[in-house]
Each structure stands twice: as C-alpha cells, then as structure tokens.
Image: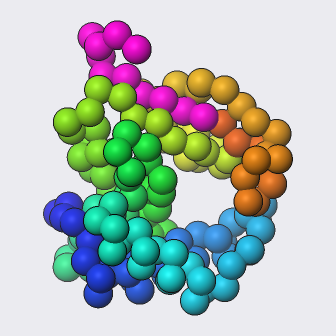
Amino acid sequence: MIRPAHDPDASALATILSDWVDATPWMPRLHTRAEDLAFVSSLVSAGQVMIAEHDGQPAGYLARDGEEIRHLYVARDQQGRGVGRALIDQAKSGFNELGLWCFQANSAALAFYAKHGFAEDHRTDGRDNEERLPDIRLVWHREGVAA
C-alpha cells in the first residue's frame, strides 16, 4: 500500500535513511540521526513524501518536489520485493518527465533506475553536492512524449 506520509511516520522513515547511510561504506555520515529525523520531518510536513507499507509498517519512501525525486529509500529487509518499483510507478503517474540525482558509486540504484526507464543526462565531479561525491543526473520521459 502506498499513501501520503504523515508527521508520525517521520521517525520510521528517518531510520530507513540513517540505516542506509550507516550500511553504505562509501557514503560519509555528515548528519546525526537526529538531524536526519529533522530533515525527513520537514519533507513529510511539506507534503512531499509517499510511503510504502508492508504489513502496516513502513517499507520505503519517496520524496518528490514536483518533477524532481529527492529521495527514494527502501528498508533493507524490504529490498527486492517491489517496494521501489511501486514507489517509482506511483511517482510517474501524472507526469511526463521526472529527474533525480544518484551518486556514481551507487551501482545498485543506477541499475534500478535504468531498469525503470531513467537515462543519464550528465555527470558531475561532486563539487556541488554536500557529500562531495561524484553524481549522475538521471531523467525519465514518458514513452511517446517528446523530451
């Protein structure tokens, strides 16, 4: 089930984000878990987050600002079960184009996005993101709609 996230969901969603940072060797930990919670809470309060649930528990979330996907994280124990696909499919509804940034080191995410129709637009050396990691701009265009 996918639904809009509400303020009480923020803690569980921030845990998904923080757990991913802690489990990803190449990702620097720049913020405390409390700061992650404050950031995710601000996204939820702004109405930018959709949550995927499994057995009534948060399985993942997608934060979108218009045509820009800002976050897509799936709980480690829910990966490979279609949660990310469901969130991406929901995000695509009503749009002809979506864009996002993905770190070049995140090969699993890059493969996931390619499988779901996102194509590389350009790369950066990481000087313009907080983590200072090289990243890739990916875009998706609805089939049959001119870019």
Q: Is residue 72 left or right of residue 101?
A: left
Residue 33 in the image: x percent, y percent? 60, 86
Residue 121 in the image: x percent, y percent? 59, 24
Q: Is residue 110 left or right of residue 92?
A: right
Report the quarter where the N terminus lies. bottom left
Q: Nearer the viewer, residue 144 or 38?
A: 38
* Residue sitting at x 29%, y 65%: 47
* Residue sitting at x 68%, y 79%: 31
* Residue sitting at x 59%, y 83%: 35
* Residue sitting at x 40%, y 35%: 98
Report the quarter where the C terminus lies. top left
Magenta range: 137-147
Residue 90 in the image: x percent, y percent? 24, 46
**Is 145 inside the magenta-drawn segment?**
yes
Residue 130 in the image: x percent, y percent? 73, 60
**Is 87 inside the magenta-drawn segment?**
no
> Is residue 109 visible in this depiction of the protein?
yes
Q: Where is 129 relative to 31, above or below?
A: above
Q: How many dots with numbers?
A: 0
> Is residue 78 visible in this depiction of the protein?
no
Q: Where is 121 relative to 30, above or below?
A: above
